[in-house]
Image (cartoon, grey):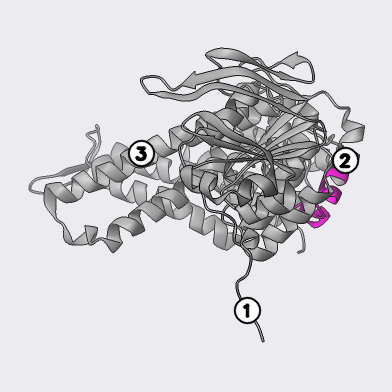
Amino acid sequence: MLNIDNISFAYPGGNPILKEINLTLVKGENTALVGPNGSGKTTLFLLCCGILKEQAGKIEVDGKFIQHKKFNSKISYLFQSPDDQLFSSTIFDDVAFGPLNMGVEKKDIHGIVREALKRVNSEKLSDKSSFHLSGGEKRIAAIASLLSMNPEVLLFDEPTANLDSRNKRKVIELIQCMDETLFISSHDLEFLLETCGRVIVIDEGRIVADGPIREIMSDEELMKRHGLEKPHSLIPHQERHHY
Amino acid sequence: MKKAPIQFWDYRWKLVSLVILIFAIAYTGKPAAMISGLAFSLLLTFFTGTNPGEAVKNLKTPLYLLLFMSPFIILTPGRELLWQLPVVKIYRESLDLLFTILLKSTSIILIFNALLYKADLTRLMQAMKTVGIPGKLISILISTYRYIFLYRKDLVKLSIAAKLRAHSKRRGFSHLLTSADIMLTLLVRSYEQSERVQAAMVMRGYRGEFYFAEKFKSKFSDKIISLVVLMAATGIILMENLC
């Protein structure tokens, strides 16, 4: 589905941030991307959707090469901050923005927006302004604004950042119901354990581990070596917490 | 919440007729025409259900500015001397100028208030597009409206962070330097955010033009209200030329 072939990248005047990255995402599979701060996770996502221009290598989505700053309806990116994504006066307008740009007929727009908001269980947000939404609602609305374009691959950058437990649960339940191919970057390892079957560990611009999430995250030595911690839920309890 | 009568007026008709009225008032120079302009703006505020409190609030800043400028305006030299004090001379032309600016600016602000009162900004932009205003300008207006609030929020946060570290206790040059740093940080942040917003828009198929989901449907009453406004504009111009 998403094929990254030998990608390297450095910001102007900086050290290489990604070095010869190779990976393939399987259709319908949820893959986690973890690594310490500055390891190149966001840069990899920005390259995957064409916001940054690759300096070496190629990225393909469903057999079509990603071109710099060219819209590709098969892939979408959820920014870390929903304020970067929502700019219209109502959530309806924001969710309708993508389909309208794609040339969807006006008579079909209401149905598409309703469907996207229904998928995220937030039809009531339609007429609200993003100024009046909570952080969790904004995040959900931002996801709906991507779903309305019906992409095949979704890149989620820190989807649970700044969310409370209730909103985090909503995002988890939403992801568990999605059948798109998801590539999720997060520092919240428990969240990733609940939503992804595979994990890619990236450190200093290179992929250092790739495989089943429980297997890799259980490897305490590997996790420590790359600035990560084994998730608490994978540590066997020595004694009972409650009596 | 109950809608004000102005919210039922078709955005295209409202935009065109109120802009013509603004131009008609801007064209006036004779007291009778200017007073008629102000009287009609007040009637418009009253009959369209525009909140008078909000109108007064919106008038405050421009009137303060005018108050600040008034000593300079009053001291503008003219031909017909009214009063002569030991140092200053006051001419009829300078008082006329102050009176003209006060009347015309108050009328125009009241009309703008009626135009924007509880308006759905997306619909207003759509109306602007329909009447032929360039797409790029509309894009700038939509983005400015959305992000000006975010930057204001950012500025408040930065100012609080500075105050919490005793910024207000510093005086003189160092105080100014910190304020300049805050503005610079805001500028850099806003630049970075604008890049992210643009990327988010391109990712959803934006190509420099906004498309709108809704269609306008004008009623007979919209045309009647617009006709009344246009008649008032014509009356003001006639009064200017004939009185």
Q: Chain of mark 3?
A: B
Q: Specify few, some or many for label 2: CA neighbours under 10 Å numbering under 14, 14-19, or 20 or more.
A: some
Residue A181 vertical position relative to residue B164 in the rendered view, above or below: above
| Amino acid type for the residue under numbered disc 2 | His
Residue A150 vertical position relative to residue A15 in the rendered view, above or below: below
The magenta stretch is A115-128
Secondary structure beneath dot 2 equals helix
Q: Is residue A8 magenta?
A: no
Query: Mark on residue B74?
Result: none
Secondary structure beneath dot 3 equals helix
Q: Chain of mark 2?
A: A
Q: Specify few, some or many for label 3: CA neighbours under 10 Å numbering under 14, 14-19, or 20 or more.
A: some
Residue identified by numbered label 1 = A241
Residue identified by numbered label 3 = B97
Drawn side of residue A225 relative to residue B228, left or right: left
User: Picture coordinates of residue B208 (x, y %)?
Assistant: 64, 21
In the rendered image, which quarter contains the N terminus of chain B?
bottom right
Which quadrant holds residue A185? top right
Q: Chain of mark 1?
A: A
The furthest residue to the bottom: A243
Instruction: Identify the mark nearer the N-term, 1 or 2.
Output: 2
Q: Nearer the viewer, residue B66 or A119?
A: A119
Q: Is residue B26 visible?
A: no
